Image: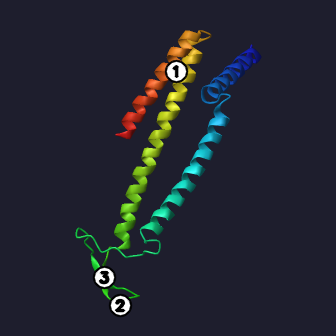
Amino acid sequence: NNNMFYRAKKNLVMNSIEIIKNASDNILTPYFAFAICVWGTIFLEVWKRKQATLSYKWQVDHFDMAEPDRPQFYGTKAEEDRYTGKLVWMYPMSYRMLKYSVSTSVLLLMMFLVIISVTSVILYRVYSNISWCGEDAKCKTIHGTVIATLLNTISIMILGW
């Protein structure tokens, strides 16, 4: 009896893995990934060429100018610039690190929310295919494709906001 339970559990796990694999992989996935890689490489190289052409055309290919401080910038202490010897307003590293840590925390939180959202949609597809649909192709189309796509769209719209 225990051996039968083990085989049933193993079949459920194998079926779940197969459903996940079929939901995210099909025969066209490697070709699509290759096309995206080629497109990205070509786009980057064409963009670099366009940038170099415009830079040469506008005669700014060796242009390097230090931007002036914004009027809204408020430094909290003045330090001597080691190259020019002039006093410049500086923003303390401790304040800067505090802002960096808050920004990084928010970024990691948002990345975690995106991962949860994508994982939830995939788990919904797997659960609906296993629990509700069985071998019914119409049910798999509605739950596995249409509703999962709508959930993905809603999560993109919410996370984009």
Label at residue 145: 1
Residue 86 vertical position relative to residue 108 in the rendered view, above or below: below
Classify 9 as above or below 120: above
- 10 Å crowding of disc 2: few (<14), some (14-19), many (20+): few
Cα gap from disc 1 to disc 2, whole angstroms? 66 Å
Element type where label 1 sits in the image: helix
Does the rendering let one see residue 98?
yes
Q: Residue at x 47, y 25 (%)?
A: 149
User: What is the crowding at mark 3: few (fewer than 14 residues within 10 Å), some, or many (at least 20)?
Assistant: some
Residue underneath mark 2:
85
* 79 on left or right of 10: left
Work out how far the residue at label 2 is from the one at label 3, CA to CA, in angstroms.
Answer: 9 Å
Q: N-terminal of the two: label 1 or label 2?
A: 2
SS of the residue under disc 2: loop
**Kind of residue indicated by mark 3:** Val
Dot 1, how many residues are within 10 Å of its Cα: few (below 14), some (14-19), or many (20+)?
Answer: some
Distance from the alpha carbon under mark 1 to that under mark 3: 60 Å
For residue 153, which quarter of the picture? top left
User: Which numbered tag is attached to residue 88?
Assistant: 3
